[in-house]
Amino acid sequence: MTATLNPPEAERSEKPASRRGDRIFAGLARGAGLTILLALAAVFIFLFVEGWNGLNAEEATYRPATDFLGYIGPLILSTILAAIIALIVAVPFAIGIALFISHYAPRRLATPVAYVIDLLAAVPSVVFGLWGGRYLADLLQPVHVWLHDRLGFLPFFGPDPASPNGRSLFTAGIVLAIMILPIITAISREVFAQTPRLHEEAALALGATRWEMIRYAVFPYARSGMVSGVMLGLGRALGETMAVAMVLAVTPVATLNVIGTASPATIASNIALNYKEATPSRQSLLIATGLVLFAVTFAINFFARWIVGRNERKQAKA
Amino acid sequence: MAKSIDVSDLNIYYGDFLAVEGVSMTIKARSVTAFIGPSGCGKSTMLRSLNRMHEVIPGARVEGKVMVDGQSLYGPDVDPVAVRRSIGMVFQRPNPFPTMSIYDNVLAGSRLNSRKLSKADADDIVERSLTHANLWNEVKDRLGKPGQGLSGGQQQRLCIARAIAVEPEVLLMDEPCSALDPISTSAIEDLIHELKSDYTIVIVTHNMQQAARVSDETGFFNLKAAGQPGHLVEFNATKKMFTNPDEPATEAYISGRFG
Ligand SMILES: Nc1ncnc2c1ncn2[C@@H]1O[C@H](COP(=O)(O)OP(=O)(O)OP(=O)(O)O)[C@@H](O)[C@H]1O
Ligand SMILES: [Mg+2]
């Protein structure tokens, strides 16, 4: 290759020396991206092939329901309810903590708080499950009664009596909230901290209070990062297996009531609870439910991105 | 409601680093005061201590006295947020809010001050402020577009419009024209002349002609040596500063023989 060291003038200007580095890096980046897509496709194909038979098997497979939709419907409902509870509880906390760390706390306090929250992410989900089922459920049982007494007219808290032991979808949702708190906090904190000083000072110099400054400068800047954080948290909440399996008292009957004696399992925890003992056709069915979970997660992600993108497009057009 | 500012023995720190030392000066109401001096001598720092923007930097603090119309700016019961509402600021680098429209950018301060603005009042403030800042004609057909889509010079004029929209008592400008073309610069200078009848204006500039053109009084800041704190060398009427300054260092700097 030494011959190319002194190419004629014209050729050199077409191929500057930096091009090779660019090409290698572009190749690496493209390769990494393709690998991820391939892995995703492989998972999808696996679920599809293995689960296909589960979509229209004999009626008996779907016991106690009689067809696939009847079987998975209650599971989807529980999955989504638990994830919604988790988000409702976790998102305000996570954003509050992230703001505290990035904009309110003195550095001496912010660093240890951030560290402790990050540590939460390292606790295995089985441990959360044990803790949630044995301790938190008892602790939250009075809350179940309270919710039922005050808000029992809503389908989510009535009309059936509240769970006597707290092993409800509500408790499972709270455990999920604690589990997804670290990821949402960590991502929000990072984007909050990167808000350009210039824009923060623009707000402050107009006489904004700290909270007004956050509304003017920090949130608009951080919005898409916050959505990413929430989506990652949501993904984890939808897919979490052990913690839900260990907390929730399960019934196959669909219900909106999240504080009742029992709820259907979530898709992921249902797979974990049943896979070992299942017959081959039953296993296909469980894999098919995994395929549906995959699709639901995807759909929710796309939907959220679309909402955010639409807002931004609207803003740019106005 | 212009106000005068009395500074005495002001030391300004970033943590342990003393950036500006021992400044005393009187900034007259309804006049334009210019700060000049070499880069890094603490002009921006000095300016930011006049509306308590200095202290938003972690560890930054001041010692000494700043009196605005006889009231201590750093008194224990003075709310820095209220201070900044009445002492406006234009920064060295343009900083419109990127996600806000041009219209909303101009109104950002007014919306903080009095939340309820009728549409007519809002339109009025926007048109008046943008006209003042010599930007109205360029943007009047795209007020709903984001401020980020403007050129650098247009963004700076938008920031000026935003600052004067709230009719502050004092306006601090940190090299407001460093990103502007000569036409916009002269428009801003006209604006400064115009505002002078109602406001107190302090402007930092690297442009000697500009200081000579717009200001009534000038303060010359300098560093004794690299790493030393900046200090105020001379503070005098602009006419005197540019014709017959008291200090030889001032003369050397103004005539370009710096050292
Ligand atoms: N955020 C900061 N933290 C620590 N030191 C700072 C900070 N900002 C400025 N300084 C220091 O304070 C001194 C004065 O800086 P300042 O920005 O006030 O200079 P200036 O006169 O405005 O310069 P220029 O003309 O280049 O804008 C410099 O030594 C600078 O390094
Ligand atoms: Mg400066």
Image (spheres, coloured by chain):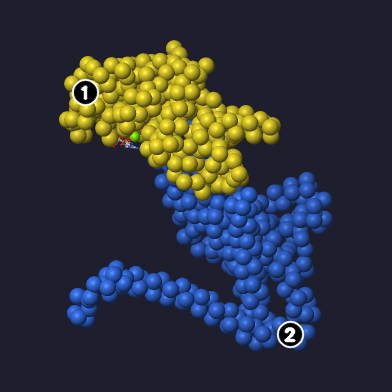
Chain colours: A blue, B yellow
Q: In this view, does A296 lie above or below B52?
A: below
How dense is the environment of label 1, judged by Cα within 10 Å: few (below 14), some, or many (20 and up)?
some
Residue B164 appears in the rendering: yes
Q: Nearer the viewer, residue A241 or A2?
A: A2
Q: Residue at x 54, y 81 (%)?
A: A42
Residue B137 in the image, given as x and y percentages of width and height: 56, 39
Q: Which of A5 and B168 is in front in this view?
A: A5
In the picture of the structure, the residue carrying the numbered disc 1 is B251
Q: Quadrant of residue B251?
A: top left
Relative to residue B251, is residue A185 drawn left or right? Answer: right
Relative to residue A49, is residue B184 drawn left or right? Answer: left
Q: In which quarter of the image is the N terminus of chain A?
A: bottom left
Q: Residue at x 74, y 47 (%)?
A: A146
In what element is the residue under mark 1? helix
In the picture of the structure, the residue carrying the numbered disc 2 is A56
Query: Where on the image, by quarter, is ligand 2?
Result: top left
Relative to residue A134, is residue B174 drawn left or right? Answer: left
Q: Which of A288 and A6 is in front in this view?
A: A6
Q: Nearer the viewer, residue A285 or A190?
A: A190
Are the residues tagged 2 and 1 within 8 Å (C-beta)?
no
Relative to residue A36, is residue B238 drawn left or right? Answer: left
Residue B126 in the image, given as x and y percentages of width and height: 59, 34
Residue B191 in the image, given as x and y percentages of width and height: 47, 28
Q: Which amino acid does label 1 sit on?
A: Glu
- State yes or no: Cβ of the residue under disc 2 lies below 8 Å from any atom of ligand 1: no
How dense is the environment of label 2, judged by Cα within 10 Å: few (below 14), some, or many (20 and up)?
few
Q: Which chain carries label 2?
A: A
Q: Mark 1 lies on which chain?
A: B
Q: Which of marks 2 and 1 is in front?
A: 1
Q: Alpha carbon of mark 2 to alpha carbon of mark 1: how far?
A: 94 Å
Q: Is residue B190 above or below residue A282?
A: above
